[in-house]
Each structure stands twice: as C-alpha cells, then as structure tokens.
Image: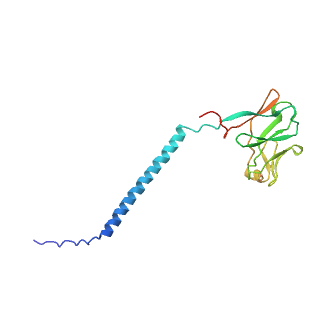
Amino acid sequence: MSEHPETPVPPQEDGELDRRGFLARASAYAMGAGLVTSYGCFAAMAGRYLYPARPAPKAWMYVAEVAGFGVGSSLTYTAPDGATVAVARQKSAGNVDDFIALSSTCPHLGCKVHWEGQNQRFFCPCHNGVFDPSGAPVSGPPFEAGQSLPRFPLRIEGGLLYIEVGLEGLPTGEE
Ligand code: FES
C-alpha cells in the first residue's frame, strides 16, 4: 500500500487572513448598502405615486379697475409668490378678452419682458426676443428655442380685473 504524499499547504500569514476577512466584510457591506439604496429608491417612487404632491395654492388677486386701464397700456403685476406678470390691454370690447397676462420673465435668460402697444408685441431687450400678442415667440433666442411666455388666467368682476396667481410663500392657514 502506497501513500500519496500530502500536498503541502503553504503556510498562511496572519496578514493575508486579515486582508481576506476585510475584503469579505467590505463586499458584504457594499452589497447591503446597494440593496438598501435600491429599496429606498423604490419606496420613494412608490410614495410619490401613491401620494402625489398637492398643487401649489392659488388665488384670484385684484389687478386694476377696467375703466382706468387704457387700450394699448400695460402694467407689471407682482404675485405673492414673487412671479412678475405683464398685464396688457390689447382690445376695447370691454370684456376679459381685451386683456392678457403673461409672465414677464423671459424664458431665454430671465430678463424682463414688456408689452409694446405701438408694435403689438412683447419685447425682451436683452437679446431682442420678440413675442406676439399671445406670448408666442416670433424672433430672437426664444423663437429659436420655441419658448413661449406662460399665461395667467384673468377675470372681470364688478368692473375690476383679477388675476389667478400662486400663493407659495404666503401663510395660508393650511397645514
Ligand atoms: S433674456 Fe430675453 S431674449 Fe435673452
């Protein structure tokens, strides 16, 4: 009967054992962290789907007396949430369709847009951005980028013009 000589096992040093142990623990922690992150992202997405964010509160705010708002004139209205709006009277029919309210913040780089009644256009002086009376871009960088001026709803009540704007930033009494 012949015996095979045993394969010699190289002696392991303590340092190598420590390194292997460390790598095994580090891999386990990394895997655990990955799982926690993945489940966390999934839970956040599911939460947003199940409980969508409430829309920002809005209210109708007084702008001006209709009788004192001449055709071709305009004013800049500042909403409680800080949005600035160019309100212009473009017609003389005497109803709400005479008026338009557009964001006065240029969608290109944020300069102030104003109504030019004599030219029947909204104009941004920073880079000659031009918008038609409805706020659609006509020329300049906003036209190239297809950027219109956002519109705000208006209504007339008792001879007074009102605009619907955001109340973000104001105390509303709601929780
Ligand atoms: S900021 Fe208005 S055109 Fe550039």
The quadrant of the rendering that contains the C terminus is top right
The front one of 151 and 84 is 84
The outermost residue toward the left is 1
Residue 171 coordinates in the image, percent (x, y): 65, 37
Residue situated furthest top in the rendering:
158
Residue drawn at point x = 34 percent, y = 64 percent: 20
Q: How many marks?
A: 0
Give the percent coordinates (x, y) of residue 87.
80, 39
Residue at left offset 44%, top offset 53%: 34
Q: Can you tell which quarter of the image residue 133 is in?
A: top right
Vertical position of residue 81 compared to residue 22: above or below: above
Q: Residue at x 37, y 63 (%)?
A: 23
Of residues 158 and 129, which is closer to you in this image? 158
The quarter holding residue 92 reads top right
Where is residue 97 shown, x and y percent of the image?
81, 33
Using the rendered view, name the quadrant where residue 22 is placed.
bottom left
**Residue 25 relative to residue 63: left or right:** left
- Residue 64, given in percent of the width and then of the height, sits at 82, 34
Q: Please, which colouring scheme is shown?
A: rainbow
In which quadrant of the rendered image does the N terminus lie? bottom left
Q: Residue furthest right?
A: 118
